[in-house]
Amino acid sequence: MPNYITALNQKITATVAATPGICVFGQNINTGTFITGLTKNLAVPPDGRIINTQNSENSLCGMGFGMMLSGARCIYFAKQLDFMLLGVDHFVNTYNFIRCSRPTATLGSFSILALVCDQGLQGPQSSFNSFGDFCSIARIPCYSVTNSQDAARIIGTELVAPGFRMIGLSSRLFKTEFLELPLVHAAGDGSVFQYTEGGDATIACFNFSLPHGRALQQALAAKGRQASLFSVNYVPQPDWSPIRDSVAKTGKLIVFDDSKSVHLPAYRLLDEVAQAGRPFRRWTVTRGEDVDFGMSTDEFRVDIGALVSQVLA
Amino acid sequence: MFDRLDIAQRHLAVKVLQVRHWQHVVNEALKKNVFPVPVHVAFGHEAAAVAIGAMMQAEDSLVLTHRNIAYNLARAGALQPVYDEYMRLPSGAGAGRLGSMNLSNPGHGVVYTSSILGNNFGVACGVALANRLAGRAGLVSVLTGDGAMEEGTFYESVALAQSHGLRCLFVVENNNHALASTIDQRRCPIDLAKLCGGVGVPFLRLSGNDVFAYASAFAEVRNTVMSASAPACVEIDVTTMNRHAGATPGWPTDPMNVDFQRGLVIAERTIDPVFVLKQVLAPALYAELEREVLMHPGSP
Ligand SMILES: Cc1ncc(C[n+]2csc(CCOP(=O)(O)OP(=O)(O)O)c2C)c(N)n1
Ligand SMILES: [Mg+2]
């Protein structure tokens, strides 16, 4: 069984190699550690291009939008999500201009594939992991890829589809075994994936917390209880109904969100389910309250055993 | 060749050897994986770091990058606070909270350090502007590399400093490397003399790794900046004699090998500031200084 980064690298290189005219770019994408394995063996068709760029994130984000505007397909590989903060002007202003003036079908494709790390070992800097929250500033579709099912859908089709999106891979999961999961349901827009179906509890995972939700679902199964397991991507206007319907049956919702922001995308789901009007029990598993110096903790601690006891109580 | 040094020269020579020695200690520790954080060692950067450190007056500030070790060691004048920081101990220069890539040390003039390329230029301008508004003398030197100067904010900040008469010195350590890419693998050449000339900022290029020559050049640049109340830019040709980050060698068959057992000198060429120092000092004098430095390791 390959590990997370090896499996995703294989899927990415396969999609890139099969996309005519694709232009892939980024810092050190064809040299050194190949962005810690992300871009290893990257090859493009004869009419494509691989560009090892200079260190100019703001301009490179603009370049991706310019290519998309001109009908070209491109992917920007980025070593860390926080480096994309330098491109925020384009994510908001350039993307807004393009969205309101050009139908998506007439556009080329621009994807940013960024590694999301909880702690880049850089001290207080480079510990920005709030992927969905980041994308919500301008309603950018964003996908946190965590397993075989979402990888097949997101890397297989979204990566080179018309329009703009960001795709995040978690540095924390790099060396872990790649999660091969069954699939119950996948929303057409890639917003909601369901992996198991059960009437005892509903588990919804945000950002890169799916492995924790999976662990809880398995721990419950070991006690003879079946849970419905979902992962949710930040996609504007998602269809929450599969999760809402599940909670209506189970009456229990456990939400995991490992992003560091205060304004967690998971709260939207809780609100959505609450608005349905039926009572339900809820558990919200997030990072600790803000700690030293107003920054979030790097470690995402989850006590599955305690959660199981509470859910079963 | 010198067979005697005045106090200032002796100070420079000893500092170069100390910074080299302490970096060896760090590199040997990196080989044993003792630090919880990666360190961007800077073998080859000692002459520049020592000369800039020596140029600084009490009121001056230094703004650094991820590759800050030589500067932090030169300014702190000791290994322990830097080493402890890499161990993330409360006794570290950043109380164990900053790690390596953000290590600053305000008590020694290192006011800000950023691992985000280009992030430090604007901050340096701010420190310089605050000096100006408060009527404080003081030069702000901000370090960057040939990679980080590709960020657009480099040009913006040079112009900003010039527009507002900021006493800001932009120092580009050009080691022809950014992570794993050389300049020609990633971009066209950038003629900094012309770029700076375009906004009227004086520019100087240094090479050769002679700490005495660098120290006089920086002292002169400081005078220019202070008297004109305007920025300047210095590009230094550097060869980084170690891997981008972590230990060197980085793997068992790594052709790049640094071994403290072989002594302080790493390369018998002018890319190595310690070799250059050894060339300009009489052998007996060099041996005396080296002995002095090795006898006071300042190491854990
Ligand atoms: C905004 C941003 N983009 C990318 C990186 C990743 N990165 C870290 S060091 C580095 C190379 C920097 O090269 P240079 O400025 O020449 O410094 P050197 O390491 O050669 O001393 C890169 C690309 C970063 N830290 N920040
Ligand atoms: Mg460099």
Image (tube, rainbow, N blue to C red):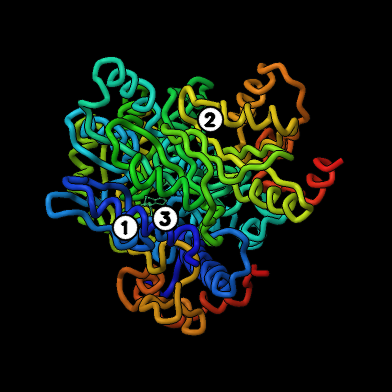
| Residue at 44 percent of width and 71 percent of height | B4
Residue A13 placement (x, y as % from top left): 31, 56
Q: Nearer the viewer, mark 3 or mark 2?
A: 3
Q: Are marks 1 and 3 in contact (CB under 8 Å)?
A: no
Q: Nearer the viewer, mark 1 or mark 3?
A: 3
- Same-chain check, marks 2 and 1: no
Q: Are marks 2 and 1 in contact (CB under 8 Å)?
A: no
- State left or right for residue A142 relative to residue A108: right
Front residue of this view, candidates A292 and B56: A292
How would you rate the neighbour count of disc 1 (Cα within 10 Å): few for under 14, some for 14-19, many for 20 or more? Answer: many
Whether ligand 1 has any atom under 8 Å from the Cβ at mark 3 is answered as no
| Residue at 34 percent of width and 61 percent of height | A40
The residue most toward the right is: A313
> Label 3's element?
helix
| Residue at 68 percent of width and 52 percent of height | A215
Quarter of the figure with the C terminus of chain A? top right
Identify the residue under disc 1: B177
Chain under label 3? Answer: A
The residue most toward the left is: A47
Type of the residue with mark 1: His
Type of the residue with mark 3: Leu
Chain under label 1? Answer: B
- State left or right for residue A98 relative to residue A222: left
Identify the residue under disc 2: A133
Identify the residue under disc 3: A8
Decide if residue B252 is in sight here: yes
Chain under label 2? Answer: A
Whether ligand 2 has any atom under 8 Å from the Cβ at mark 1 is answered as yes
Front residue of this view, candidates B14 and A108: A108
Residue A56 placement (x, y as % from top left): 31, 40
| Distance between mark 1 and mark 3 Cα atoms | 28 Å
How would you rate the neighbour count of disc 2 (Cα within 10 Å): few for under 14, some for 14-19, many for 20 or more? Answer: many
